[in-house]
Image (cartoon, helix red, strand yellow):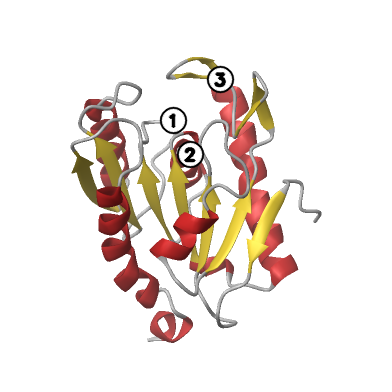
Amino acid sequence: MPLEFAHRYVPGRTADAPVLLLLHGTGGDENDLLPLGVTLAPGAACLSPRGKVLEQGMPRFFRRLAEGVFDVPDLIERTRELAEFVRAAAVEYRFDPAAVFAVGYSNGANIAASLLLLHPGVLRGAVLFRSMVPLVPPSRPALEGVPVFVAAGRRDPIVPFPLTQQLADLLEDAGAEVTVHVEPAGHELTDGDVAAAREWLTPRLRRAAPADRRA
């Protein structure tokens, strides 16, 4: 299957290293979150696609009708494309498809949440910065035990905290193990977000190692 997203792939330090699927915000590209990936998980492989939708020339992962109002049919189709991309990349780059953690910011976090809700099993877990409910799935996904870190800004004018809490509640209702982190900040990513996400992610990446999954 061809890899239909422009992307960067940085191999891990070892052949069985965990893989971070890095998903940028509106106006970003496949290079934006690579430094964040290195900070969060030194030695992990990084798979970083560029969103295929353009909004006034700015890449996004799916269309929206207005700020906070998503084109749901497009979101469903783009989420399917992204799930297929991850599976194809696992074959192309020879990494374990069961070891993929998403790290998304804003629009990228929203499509990562959509991946969890519509295609459970594609992601081992996720770090979602400044995210909201992308859509309500037609049936309850099976997310039992899937770890998800959700980081919100208390003063975020784009994604107010109650909207992030709604996403956390939706994921928890599906069985995910959700940790909510709140920064005294707006929509921008802070050092506190990154430090908390790294502390949360490190032990969970260890649990995702092949030897641990066989135990």
Per the model, the C-alpha gap separating discs 2 and 1 is: 6 Å
Where is 57 relative to 93, above or below?
above
Circle 2 — which element? Answer: helix
Residue farthest to the right? 2
Describe residue 9's horizontal placement relative to residue 194 as left or right: right
Mark 3 and 1 residues: CB-CB less than 8 Å, in contact? Answer: no
Q: Where is residue 28 in the image (x, y as percent from the top left)?
A: 57, 38
Query: Crowdedness of circle 2 by 10 Å Cα count: few (<14), some, many (20+)?
Result: many
Describe residue 108's horizontal placement relative to residue 95 as left or right: left
Image quarter where the N terminus lies is bottom right
* Type of amino acid at the residue the image marks with label 2: Ser
Where is 209 relative to 74, above or below?
below
Q: Which of marks 3 and 1 is nearer the N terminus?
A: 3
Q: Residue at x 20, y 32 (%)?
A: 154
Q: Can you tell which quarter of the image residue 160 is in?
A: top left
Q: Earlier in the sequence, mark 2 or mark 1?
A: 2
Mark 2 and 1 residues: CB-CB less than 8 Å, in contact? Answer: yes
Which residue carries the number 2 mark?
114
Q: Residue at x 28, y 27 (%)?
A: 156
Per the model, the C-alpha gap separating discs 3 and 1 is: 10 Å
Q: Residue at x 63, y 35 (%)?
A: 78
Query: Crowdedness of circle 3 by 10 Å Cα count: few (<14), some, many (20+)?
Result: some
Circle 3 — which element? Answer: loop
Which residue carries the number 3 mark?
71
Q: Where is residue 175 in the image (x, y as percent from the top left)?
A: 29, 51
* Type of amino acid at the residue the image marks with label 3: Asp
Q: Which of marks 3 and 2 is nearer the N terminus?
A: 3
Q: Position of residue 120 (x, y in %)?
A: 48, 51
Circle 1 — which element? Answer: loop
Which residue carries the number 1 mark?
134
Q: Can residue 152 be seen in this view?
A: yes
